[in-house]
Image: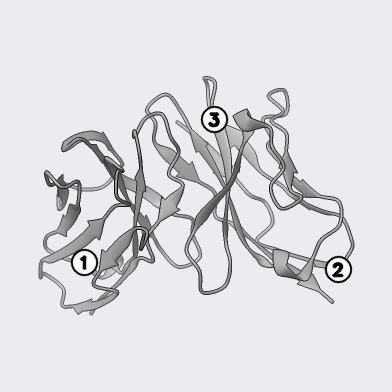
Amino acid sequence: DAGVTQSPTHLIKTRGQHVTLRCSPISGHKSVSWYQQVLGQGPQFIFQYYEKEERGRGNFPDRFSARQFPNYSSELNVNALLLGDSALYLCASSQQGRGDPEAFFGQGTRLTVV
Amino acid sequence: AQRVTQPEKLLSVFKGAPVELKCNYSYSGSPELFWYVQYSRQRLQLLLRHISRESIKGFTADLNKGETSFHLKKPFAQEEDSAMYYCALRGSNYKLTFGKGTLLTVNP
């Protein structure tokens, strides 16, 4: 099992552009959560999806959106990118979502907005 | 609102010395507390959770509701314990809130 996989690993975008980040959970895991980690800070919760439904949303603007597909993979979309969106974006998966803590994280996607 | 505070950004100890990484939280209900660890060039991973009351890699953490603390302790630090440690809280909304992390360095 490859664990939680994220793509791409690195990305450079220009202000105002749109970006899509992808995450594949561990086989059998139905919950996917997204976190933003700015340099020097801990991960900050963005979204949680379970069985294709949004179960939780953090304090992020509407420019951030996500969805989960029937195979439980997920996409995080960010519109109208700002310099401040530059961060490491982490995806985590768990089996049941609300019962389990996020024990398995991906390696992250490093987004740089210039 | 839920908040996690890790007062030490950096902590340096010698091998064999006891280590304590501090974590204080703010939450009005009954939280779940966790410690996560990230070794160099590795992924973030769950180390332990307070409800299981287990010891992982020699680390323990006790939830003190009176002091709203969940400090991580190990009696004898090893060089391989050097890593970034994050304390995290989960409230009734099941959202994980992380602290800013403490970078532990264990010197030989």
Which of the pair A74/B2 is nearer the observer? A74
Amino acid tagged 2: Lys
Numbered disc in front, either 1 or 2? 2
Residue A15 as seen in the image, left or right of residue A85: left
How far is the residue under mark 3 from the one under mark 2? 31 Å
Amino acid tagged 1: Leu
Look at mark 3 in the image and give the residue it sits on.
B32
What percent of the width, then of the height, locates residue B74?
Answer: 80, 51
Q: Are marks 1 and 2 on the same chain?
A: no
What percent of the width, then of the height, locates residue B85?
Answer: 61, 56
Numbered disc in front, either 1 or 3? 3
Q: Secondary structure at mark 1?
A: loop
Q: The disc numbered 1 marks a residue on which chain?
A: A
Residue at the image position 10 percent from the left and 66 percent from the top: A18
Residue at the image position 29 percent from the left and 43 percent from the top: A28
Residue at the outermost front position: A1
Look at mark 2 in the image and give the residue it sits on.
B15
Look at mark 1 in the image and give the residue it sits on.
A82
What percent of the width, then of the height, locates residue B89?
Answer: 52, 37
